[in-house]
Each structure stands twice: as structure tokens, then as C-alpha cells.
Amino acid sequence: MANSRRVYITLNQNKDKDRVIEDFLSNSYSEADCIKEVLYRMATENPVAKKSSKETNTNKKKVVNVDSKVKQLKTDLTKIAMEMVLNA
């Protein structure tokens, strides 16, 4: 008995997401290997399904913190750009 398992997917060209997937796969040498690699990376690098609610809440706080820093940076850059225009 084989130690492998076959998984089937169907892509419908009438659906936007499926067309994007088809385009992505068409650029790979081996579609099966590409799919395995993508799924492996999802499962090992960012296991969303395995996160606890505590981890999720911590990540939300980090995102809010980064968002506020980005907003402040945009404000600072706008001020600098305005000063440069006025001083030119």
C-alpha cells in the first residue's frame, strides 16, 4: 500500500480567484510541487489555525501599534515635504 494521498482541486476560469491561481501555477515548472510548497509554507510559517486567542490579541495590538507609527511617520514626512516646498 502506498504512503501517499491524492488531493483534487477544480479551478473555474469564470471565477476571479481561480483565474489568479491558474496564472500563478502556469508560471511554475511543476504545478503539484508549487502547490505543495505553498501549502507547506502556510502550514509552517504562519499557522493561523494553531494560534491561541491570546496570541491573536497580541498580534492585533502590534498591528494597531504599527498602524499608529505609520500614520505618525506619514504626518512627519508631509510636514518635511511642505517645509521643503516652502523653503525652495
Image: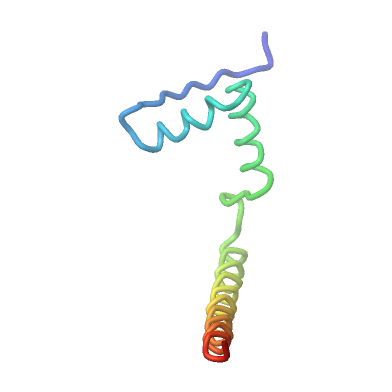
Compared with 34, 79 (above or below) is below
Residue at 40 percent of width and 37 percent of height = 17
**Image quadrant assignment for residue 81:** bottom right
| Residue 38, image x, y percentages | 61, 36
- 39 or 83: nearer the viewer: 83
**Image quadrant assignment for residue 70:** bottom right
Compared with 79, 70 (above or below) is above
User: Hey, which residue is sitting farthest front in the picture?
Assistant: 88
Can you say which quadrant of the picture contains the N terminus?
A: top right
| Residue 8, image x, y percentages | 48, 21
Residue at 58 percent of width and 23 percent of height = 31
- 53 or 70: nearer the viewer: 70
Residue at 53 percent of width and 25 percent of height = 26
- 65 or 81: nearer the viewer: 81
| Residue 7, image x, y percentages | 53, 22
Residue at 48 percent of width and 30 percent of height = 23
